Image (tube, grey):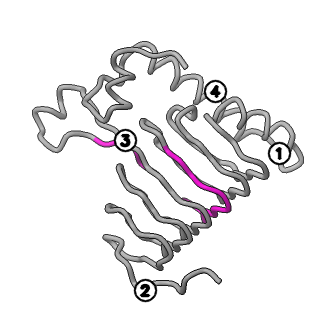
Amino acid sequence: METSIEKDLMLAGEPYLSADPLLVLERRNARRLTRLYNATTEDEDDLRRSILAELLGEVGESVQIEPPFRCDYGSLIRVGANFYANFGCVILDCNRVTIGRDVMFAPDVHIYAATHPTDPVERISGRELAFPVTIGDRVWIGGGSKILPGVTIGEGTTIAAGSVVSRSIPARVVAAGVPCRVIRELDPPA
C-alpha cells in the first residue's frame, strides 16, 4: 500500500488534506471498481468476487454485497467470512473499517469513518478527519442505520433499524435509537 504524509495523517486520526494526489488517485480507483461492481448482474458471482478482492483490503469467504455499493477507498475495508450487505450500503472508509464474521446489514446501512472539524474556521481550511470503525462477529445492523466515526460495535449485538450509532455499543445487546443506546442485554452464548 502506497503512502503519503496526508494518508499517514488520515490513518492516524489527524487532520489531513483529501486533495492529496495519492488519496485522489486511490478514490478514483475505488470509484472505477464500484462502478464495475454495480454494473454486474445477479449471475456474475465470480466477477463480483474478483472485483471485491481487488477493491477491498480483505475479503473473507462467502461475502455478498448487493449492488449498489459505494465506498471511498475500499482498501481500508476488512470484511470477514459470511458477510452480507443488502442494497444501498455506503462505507466512507477514510480510516480502517473492520467488519467481523457472520455479519449482516439490512438495506441502506451507512458507515462513516469520515468526519469534519466542528469549528468552521478549521472546516473551511479543507482539512478533514477520520476515525476507525469496528464491527464484531455475528452483528446484525438494521435498515437505514448510520454508524459514525470511531465507533465499535461488540460481538453478537443487534442494532435496530434507523439507529444512529454515535458511541460504541457493547457485545451481546440489542440497541436502538437516535442516538443509539442499549435497550436490553442478551443471554450469554450457550
Q: Is residue 154 magenta?
A: no
Kindly identify the residue that appears in the image at 40 percent across and 44 percent down: 132
141 sits left or right of 113 in the view: right
SS under mark 1: loop
Residues packed near mark 4 inside 10 Å, few (<14), some (14 to 19) or many (20 plus): few
127 sits left or right of 120 in the view: right
Q: Which residue is mark 2?
A: 184
Which label's residue is closer to the chain start, 4 or 2? 4
What's the residue type where badge 1 is placed? Thr
Camera-side mark, 2 or 3: 2
Which label was assigned to residue 32? Answer: 4
Kindly identify the residue that appears in the image at 77 percent across and 48 percent down: 61
Q: Position of residue 36 (x, y in %)?
A: 72, 32
Question: Looking at this view, is 120 or 112 the one in front?
Answer: 112
Kindly identify the residue that appears in the image at 32 percent across and 25 percent down: 9
Which label was assigned to residue 41? Answer: 1
Q: Position of residue 44 (x, y in %)?
A: 87, 43
114 sits left or right of 185 in the view: left
Q: Position of residue 45 (x, y in %)?
A: 85, 45
Asked whether the beta carbons under mark 2 and mark 3 sit within 8 Å of each other, the answer is: no
Q: Position of residue 51 (x, y in %)?
A: 74, 33
Give the answer, above or below, for where 89 lies relative to 183.
above
Farthest residue, direction front: 190
What's the residue type where badge 2 is placed? Arg
Q: Is residue 109 magenta?
A: yes
The region drawn magenta spans 97-115
Asked whether the beta carbons under mark 4 and mark 2 sit within 8 Å of each other, the answer is: no
What's the residue type where badge 4 is placed? Arg
Which label's residue is closer to the chain start, 2 or 3? 3
Which label's residue is closer to the chain start, 3 or 4? 4
